[in-house]
Every structure is written in C-alpha cells, then in structure tokens.
Image (cartoon, rainbow, N blue to C red):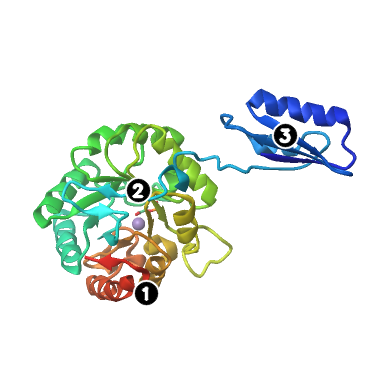
Amino acid sequence: MIVAMQDKATEEHIQHVIERMVELGFNVHRTTGATQTILAGVGTPGHFDVAEFKVLSGVYDAYRISSPYKLAGRSFRPEGTTITFPNGVVVGGEQITIMAGPCSVESREQILLSAKQVKAAGAQFLRGGAFKPRSSPYSFQGMGLEGLKLLREVGDETGLLVITEVMEISQIELMLPYIDCFQVGARNMQNFNLLRELGHVRKPVLMKRGISATIEEVLLSAEYILSGGNYDLILCERGIRTYETYTRNTMDISAIPVLKKLTHLPVMGDPSHGVGIRDLVPPMALASVAAGADGLLMEMHPNPDKAMSDGAQSLYPEQLEKLIAKLRLLAPVVGRSVA
Ligand code: PEP
Ligand code: MN
C-alpha cells in the first residue's frame, strides 16, 4: 500500500499513519520529499481496508499495490485453470464450451426435446433452472426436485453434462446427485454464506457476475469459494444494469478480457441475460468469444413463444445451430476451437 501525505501533514499525523500500518503487519518505508511524505507499506498483512487510510488526518490519498484477492488472482496460477468434467469435457482449455438450454425446466417433454436440440447443435452442457430466482413471487418458481431429476435423466440420455442454479444452502445436498455443475445466479453473487458452503463441495461452480457488481467484487466473491478449497470455479459475465433500457442489461464485453487478465479462472459469457433480446444474442455470443471467453451459457427453447420464463431472449433451435456453426469459423481466429 502507498500512502501519500498532504503537504501540510504534521509529524504527528505521519507517525499515526505509520503506527496503524505497522499494527496491520506492514514494513513501512518512508520517503520525505521537499513538501510531501510518501509511506510505502510492504509485506503481506491480512485483510485491510485502504479506505480507512484515505480518511486519516493528514492523508492526501492511499492506494493498494497488491490485489485483495489472493487465490483468484492470475499470479496464483499463471498458466490458467482448466476444469475436467467426468465425461472428459474440459472448461478453460483450447476448446470453447457451449452450455445451452431453456431458462427453466418445464416438463419432461420440453427438457428432453431441448436436450436433443442442444446436443444436435453441438453443445456440451444442458442448462435449465429447477429453482428459479424470479423478480416477482407470482411468476413460475421452477419445478424443484422433479426438475433436477428430469435434467439428470435427459442429460444421461443425450450424453450432456448438466448445469443448474443453486439458490440456497439447503439445496446443495439435494442437488449433488443430479448435477455436474452448480450455477450461482447474479442475484446470489454476494450471498456469502452460500458461496462459503460451495467452497466446501467438490463439484464445479459457475458464478455469474452480480447485476451491479464491480469486477473487484466478482473476484472477491470468487475468493469466498476458492478459500474453502473448491478451485473448480468458472466466472460468467451476464450483463450489468446501466442507464440503458433498450437491452435488458448491458453486456459488458470488456469484463471478459479484464477478468482473463486478472484471474486464472475460466470466464464465460451469457449473452442471453446480457441483452435479453433473442436476435441480439448471436452477435454478443460471437463478440464474447472474440474477446477471449472460454465458453458461452445461452438460453434456447424448443418453443420460445410459449416459454414459462425468459422466452424473449431464448434462441430458436435453428438459431443456436447457426450460431455454433459461425463460432466454429470464428474461434480459430482467436486461437480456439469449437467441438
Ligand atoms: C438464469 O440463468 O436463468 C438466470 C436466472 O440468470 P441470472 O442469474 O444471470 O439472472
Ligand atoms: Mn433465464
């Protein structure tokens, strides 16, 4: 940490700042210029809040020079994390991973047909919510356990891996036998108790960016899961809330290369929630991969016009097929491939 003192800071102010830095475990190096004193704190103290220093008397400004996320930071695993699933599918490697399916599991027929279509298009994962975080309590809340069983059944039948959202701690045990990857939704990115528990399971987790979360907050939330010992974590950009209302959210494509630079974790893009409008999903999917995404999570429904949730942003099956064909052409340009 660097603390720059004000020109008018007194020796008492400076000593007070030094004492607080030493208390936190920093070795303090002091440079006194003609007018200003700079204090450089080196060492590896535990958690500290730089904001605390910014408001101390006599301080002009304070900056972190090390990242607050130790396990999520790129330097922890400079070569990058790859996650190998039971059937050999690798996330974070050279191949782009495609996860697709309806927003919600609605019935056996709907999820079986979805799985067949998703598989035919070339995806590796079937997505589908069994527990749904809906903005309104009166909207469809998901099929629950029945939905989990259906996902597993049709996943096995078609040879697809299965990803679905976990909304609370009590669902973790229930879900374990049925799923291949937990999805933490945008609304739960800062449900720290849930994140801690997911750190203790030995099953991969895909964590979405919160609706108004900064990139640093995403990485600190990742740290909750990693610090429990679960290193099989995928991050996912799914759009953030801005003043723009034309699209459902603003798909922050730039977050993808930023995250790839800051963390070793695989990064995926979810253009469906990112824009909320079906016809805008393919261009944003292509943009995500061009920007370095390790994969895509997308909504596709056999009959989107009748979907019980997120129909407007769900691709028609033929749209998904066409998109994946385009991704196969694009991926080599950025040194990747699509199965
Ligand atoms: C979903 O994937 O259907 C979902 C609810 O996503 P998000 O958490 O990004 O809103
Ligand atoms: Mn959805």
SS of the residue at dot 3? strand
- Point out the image quarter for the C terminus: bottom left
Q: Residue at x 38, y 50 (%)?
A: 79
Q: Which residue is mark 1?
A: 279
In the rendered view, does 131 fall on the left or right side of 276?
left
Q: Which residue is mark 2?
A: 81
Q: Where residue 19 sits: x, y (%)?
A: 74, 25
Some atom of ligand 1 lies within 8 Å of the CB belonging to the residue at label 3: no
Three-letter code for the amino acid on which mark 2 is drawn: Thr
Q: Do residues under tags 3 and 1 come within 8 Å of each other at their CB atoms?
A: no
Q: Quadrant of residue 68?
A: top right
> Rounded to the nearest whole Å, what is the CA distance between mark 2 and mark 3?
36 Å
Three-letter code for the amino acid on which mark 3 is drawn: His
Q: Do residues under tags 1 and 2 come within 8 Å of each other at their CB atoms?
A: no
SS of the residue at dot 2? loop
The residue lying toward the viewer, choosing from 335 and 235, is 335
Nearest to N terminus: mark 1 or mark 2: 2
The residue lying toward the viewer, choosing from 139 and 199, is 199
How many neighbours does mark 3 have within 10 angstroms: few (below 14), some (14-19), or many (20 or more)? few
Nearest to N terminus: mark 2 or mark 3: 3
Give the foreground label among 3 and 1. Answer: 3
